[in-house]
Amino acid sequence: MLFDSHSHMYSVKFDNDREEVFKRIKEAGVEYVLNAGADLETSMRAIECAHKYDMFYASVGCHPHDVKDLDEETLLLFKGLAKKPKVCAIGEIGLDYYYDHSPRDLQQHWFRRQIQLAHEVSMPIIIHDRDANDDTLKILKEEKAFELGVLMHCFSGSAELARQYIHLGAKISIAGPVTFKNAKKIIEVVETVPIEHLLVETDAPYLTPEPFRGKRNESAYVRYTAEKVAEIKKIPFEETARITCANAKSFFKIK
Ligand code: NI
């Protein structure tokens, strides 16, 4: 039993073969998939998917790339979406100083406002942090985000940073890059973090794990990431799948 803790399976990239792709998810032993919203439109698509298919759950929020277009009125719409059935987190939200698609002061402002929204609706948050480790941690602390539950999606920081996060009560989600031949830092993270604090994800259609690296990613491939985690932690695959699935269910409060 597997839980893909972060995916975008509502993407237009699956429009031509969605039903086949969704069938493969089940066949791969993946029981649950969290579809993360990245703006208003994709948040609504994630909810639609969750209402149509049993295995899907949704999160709603605005990705740092797109906060340049965000305003208070739209934030209220996100609040309304957060109350829909099967929506179990606010995200993905955070900071991205690698691409800087939105100005950094706006990224920080809307990151704070969306954490405040999560407080209003009492929901955990899913964090995107790319090349912004210091500011992300600072804002999370200042906004008392760890009271809500914090999931570090596609974690790419050091083992030391991962240690700090789990000490604060956050969970770490491991994505496809752990399977890459040149992976080193993320393998150290998996070695360091106890399995009780680890989740696995695809971030499909992006970040495809080996042996499919370079192709379109899909939730079924979370299996390869979980297999790699099992190998690094020297824990049988079935147990790794069971524990990471239980961790995700508990984080998202899914019964
Ligand atoms: Ni994502």
Image: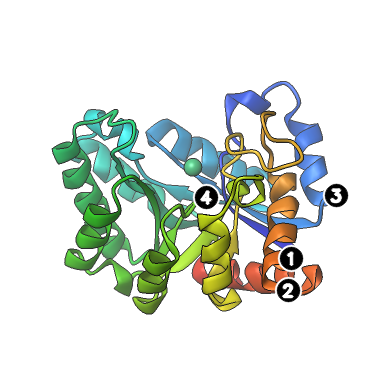
At horizontal 69% and vertical 35% (from top left) the residue drawn is 213
Residue at mark 2? 234
Residue at mark 3? 27
Q: Residues within 10 Å of mark 1 (few under 14, many from 20)?
A: few
Residue at the farthest top position: 16
Q: Residues within 10 Å of mark 2 (few under 14, many from 20)?
A: few
Q: Could one spot residue 86 in this view of the protein?
A: no
Name the kind of residue labelled 4 in the image. Answer: Ala
Residue at mark 1? 231
Image location of residue 142, percent across then percent down: 17, 65
Q: Are marks 1 and 4 in contact (CB under 8 Å)?
A: no
Q: Earlier in the sequence, mark 2 or mark 4?
A: 4
Name the kind of residue labelled 2 in the image. Answer: Lys
Q: Quadrant of residue 90?
A: bottom left
Q: How many marks?
A: 4
* Label number found at residue 58: 4
Q: Are marks 2 and 4 in contact (CB under 8 Å)?
A: no
Task: Report how far apart the C-alphas of labels 1 and 2 lie in the structure.
Answer: 5 Å
Image location of residue 207, percent across then percent down: 59, 39
Judge whether 159 appears above or below 180 on screen: below
Task: Report how far apart the C-alphas of labels 2 and 4 lie in the structure.
Answer: 32 Å
Q: Earlier in the sequence, mark 3 or mark 1?
A: 3
At horizontal 26% and vertical 51% (from top left) the residue drawn is 114
Q: Nearer the viewer, residue 133 or 15?
A: 133
Q: How is the image coloured?
A: rainbow
Q: Residues within 10 Å of mark 3 (few under 14, many from 20)?
A: few
Q: Nearer the viewer, mark 3 or mark 1?
A: 1
